[in-house]
Amino acid sequence: MFSAVQPSRRTFLVGAGRFAAASALTSVTPFPAIAEPRPHRIAASALKDLAGAVQGGVVLPDDPFFDDYARPNNLRFRTLPTAIARCASETDVQACVAWVRKHGARFAVRSGGHNYAGFSTTPGLLIDMTPLSTITPLPGGDGLVKVGGGALNGMVYQALERLNRTVTHGRCTTVGAAGFLLGGGIGFNMRMFGMGSDLLQATSIVTADGALHADIQDSGDGSDLFWACRGGAGGNFGINTSFTLRTFPVETVTFFDITWTTDVGEVLHTLLTRLADAPPEFGSKINITKPARGSGDPRLTVSILGQLHKCSTTVEAIIGPVLEKASKTRIDRDIAYWPAQDLLNEFTYPYFYQEKSSYMRAADITPESVATMIRLAERMPGTSMANAFKFFQVGGKVNATAADATAYVHRGYDWLFSSEVNWWNRKDPKSLVDENLAWQERFYTAVNTATKAMGAFQNFPDPSLKDWSDAYYGGNYGRLRRVKTAYDKDDLFTYRQGIKPL
Ligand SMILES: Cc1cc2nc3c(=O)[nH]c(=O)nc-3n(C[C@H](O)[C@H](O)[C@H](O)COP(=O)(O)OP(=O)(O)OC[C@H]3O[C@@H](n4cnc5c(N)ncnc54)[C@H](O)[C@@H]3O)c2cc1C
């Protein structure tokens, strides 16, 4: 959606000397020391400097499209930046890093803007990566595809569809590939191929000193930095300008979407325990949905959505007898892969939300723990929007990688649990939102205790999480801090739950 909108000429500052400025900036020595961060007052002369250096242009608040560029997915964190630099090249990215150091300006890096906790918002300079969105199959025929550091997932899917290939990908086309991959990346294919970050073969990244580390891989000098980019989350080590991914040929799949309105506790317990033994070709997400307040029927429903790649069994056999209790069953066999994704895709407009997540093993999920979830969920005050708690099915190939082999530490689990509170500011008073958030804390604690759930998904960052470093990174946090110290000891790339140098 970003690429379709061009800013106006009036505020799209492009300085006359941009080519000279840009080429000078590819040199990284001497590099400006980091000035003291200043609040979001950026001098007009500094903005002119920036415009002279960034070929992709600088967008200012009086541009008609400024608000659209600036809007994050979670409207709770809608801070307007002072200016937006649109990076169209690696040189532009280097220019932005040099500029924020020189001026001590606050900044944030953004691709899709879908960070749950507002970590890609800033009152200073927003470094918008979306113009860097080229997607190129690499020569050699082994299925490697290079994705620009600002590409949105929908662009990646279109390119892969043309190539008849796929990766582990999500359902939302407006999520950025950068945030998705750097924080792990979950999707219906992960049990077959591994996490999105497991498919990362190489990445290019501009670090705090302005150096471009091109196509670093899992060997040689850059290996620690590469290791950190596979699950260490965006915004920590530098600005990634490209990602090289392993891809896989597509085949037809079976799509399924099944809903239960009765016996929800029994159905949920059966699904959570039985499906852990499903083959890796089976990818699913279970939702327990609480309808919007005042919608008439307050009952919870259970639904499962997903796909089964070709294998020796069927969706019916995997789900088992509980299927007979379903109130709605849709199972479509042999659908071409990418048209099936159209059925699985979700599209959401920005709104207000908070998510809390953790990881569970099926062996720890008992009828009693599920009864606790249902009982508490029935007592959720609710908002003007539907709310849900969800289980993303992990396992399979996700667990074939050791917890310390990449920065993504959460291996050995069957389910990624997530509880959401969604609201709309004009319909849900603050007191009701607070009541729901307090309920969510109690629910999260009770569910984690009842199921021995641990950790939290770094790609679903939770601003209220106190022990976030342990929850997101577990035993990998120490190594991540060492990498951070090696590449950004002054903590230029910083945010509230960012990895801190030693
Ligand atoms: C509607 C919705 C659906 C989602 N679906 C899925 C899903 O199916 N699977 C899944 O795994 N996750 C999913 N997520 C979570 C999503 O993957 C993460 O929020 C992800 O980090 C968002 O990436 P982004 O580029 O859109 O976000 P941004 O907010 O732009 O960036 C996320 C973080 O990465 C940093 N960053 C951005 N670009 C770069 C870059 N080029 N280099 C370095 N750092 C960068 C930002 O500063 C920020 O800290 C979903 C989120 C939403 C809101």
Image (cartoon, grey):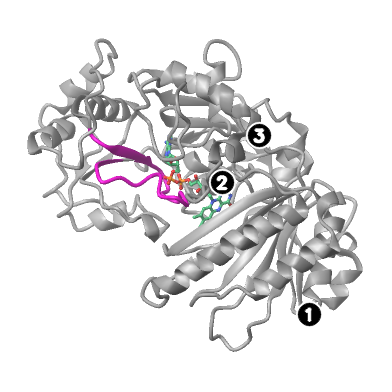
Q: Is residue 346 above or below residue 192?
A: below
State the residue in front, 433 or 274. Answer: 433
**Which quadrant: the N terminus?**
bottom left
Residue tagged 1: 262
Residue tagged 2: 162
Q: Residue at x 87, y 65 (%)?
A: 316
Q: Write down the region rendered in magenta.
A: 105-126
Q: Residues within 10 Å of mark 3 (few under 14, many from 20)?
A: many
Q: Is residue 287 left or right of residue 86?
A: right
Residue 201 image offset from top left, x and y in percent: 59, 26
| Amino acid carrying mark 2 in the image | Arg
Nearer the N terminus, badge 3 or badge 1? Answer: 1
Q: CA distance from mark 3 to mark 2?
A: 33 Å
Q: Residue at x 53, y 48 (%)?
A: 465
Q: State yes or no: residue 114 in magenta.
A: yes
Q: Is the magenta region chiefly helix, strand or loop?
A: loop
Residue 157 image offset from top left, x and y in percent: 55, 48
Residue tagged 3: 409
The label shown at residue 388 is none
| Amino acid carrying mark 1 in the image | Thr
Q: Residue at x 54, y 41 (%)?
A: 468
| Amino acid carrying mark 3 in the image | Val
Q: Is mark 2 within 8 Å of ligand 1?
A: no
Q: Is residue 212 above or below residue 155?
A: above
Residue 350 image offset from top left, x and y in percent: 41, 62
